[in-house]
Image: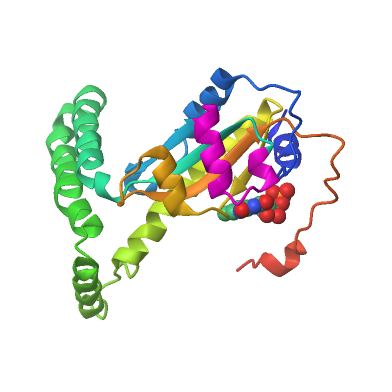
Amino acid sequence: MDLKEMLAHRRAIRVYDKTKHIDTERVADCLRLAQLAPTSSNMQMWECYHVTDAKTLEALHRACFQQTAATTAQELVVFVVRPNYVKRRATANLTFQERNIREHFPKEKQEKYLKRWSMYYKKAIPFLYGRFFGLFGLLRKGLMQLLTPFRPMLHQTSEADGNVILHKSCALVAETFMLAMSEIGYDTCPLEGFDSWRVKRALHLPYSAQISLIVSCGVRNEAAELGERFRIPFEEQYIRI
Ligand SMILES: Cc1cc2nc3c(=O)[nH]c(=O)nc-3n(C[C@H](O)[C@H](O)[C@H](O)COP(=O)(O)O)c2cc1C
């Protein structure tokens, strides 16, 4: 399939064919491809739980209000964001960049780049991602407001804004996964209709983890009516400047 065909094939499937099995390893391969999606500051503060175990699936069906998009699916992938992974992801990025710079950048520029990455992941990122019951975000937002008359500043800096940033990146990962599934003829449905507390309990996740999206997986039931796809006229959404 080329990209156009993949995009046309991907639909939100609500009824899967229980007789058509999908290969768990191929689904995992699509998740591996989804890792290539971009994330803000390359922080990759997401993880996915590929659920194939019958008991956990049953608990998730209940958490998804028994939607057929979940109950008829063969597997579910739960995309989770982890706001408290700042330090470990920043360290991983910096460790990688130190090697990357030494191996791929001209010798005379290495120190400059190393210093820049170190500032970014040791100072800027902890400042921008830091949280303390909403208070740190409030302080950060206040500081940015004070500085904005003098220079362009980020404004989405509260802790709630931080959640949007994490879920935004995670959604790109989930979309990449769904397109990869589409490319091999597998079907998916993104779901945000779920009880996130129950999902967390089923996956033994801590309070700090946030459920971003559940993607159900299987092969569509051709007998179930899908209907046409509705999209707003392009001209209403496309503004060329
Ligand atoms: C963030 C998000 C959450 C969604 N949640 C649900 C859901 O809980 N249940 C459901 O049946 N479909 C859900 N959908 C699927 C949308 O309804 C569907 O993508 C939309 O109607 C467009 O249809 P298409 O994907 O076939 O083009 C969700 C889609 C997105 C992007």
* Colour convention: rainbow
Location of residue 115 in the rendering, given as x and y in whole percent from the top left corner: 13, 42
In this figure, what is the number of numbered marks?
A: 0
Look at the image and tell me whether residue 175 can be seen. no
Residue 17: image quadrant is top right
| Residue under the image location 41 percent in, 46 percent down | 200
| Residue under the image location 84 percent in, 34 percent down | 222
| Residue under the image location 34 percent in, 48 percent down | 209
**Left or right of 82 in this view: 13:** right
Seen from the viewer's position, the closer of residues 199 and 96 is 199
Chain part drawn in magenta: 51-71
Look at the image and tell me whether residue 74 can be seen. yes
Query: Can you say whether 189 is above or below 75 in the image?
Result: below
Quadrant location, the C terminus = bottom right
Location of residue 84 in the rendering, given as x and y in whole percent from the top left corner: 25, 48
**Left or right of 222 in this view: 131:** left
| Residue under the image location 40 percent in, 45 percent down | 201
**Left or right of 216 in this view: 86:** left
Seen from the viewer's position, the closer of residues 69 and 103 is 69
Residue 162: image quadrant is bottom left
- The magenta stretch spans residue 129: no
Location of residue 154 in the rendering, given as x and y in whole percent from the top left corner: 31, 67
Location of residue 37 in the rendering, given as x and y in whole percent from the top left corner: 47, 39
Quadrant location, the N terminus = top right
Q: Main SS of the magenta segment?
A: helix
Seen from the viewer's position, the closer of residues 76 and 141 is 76
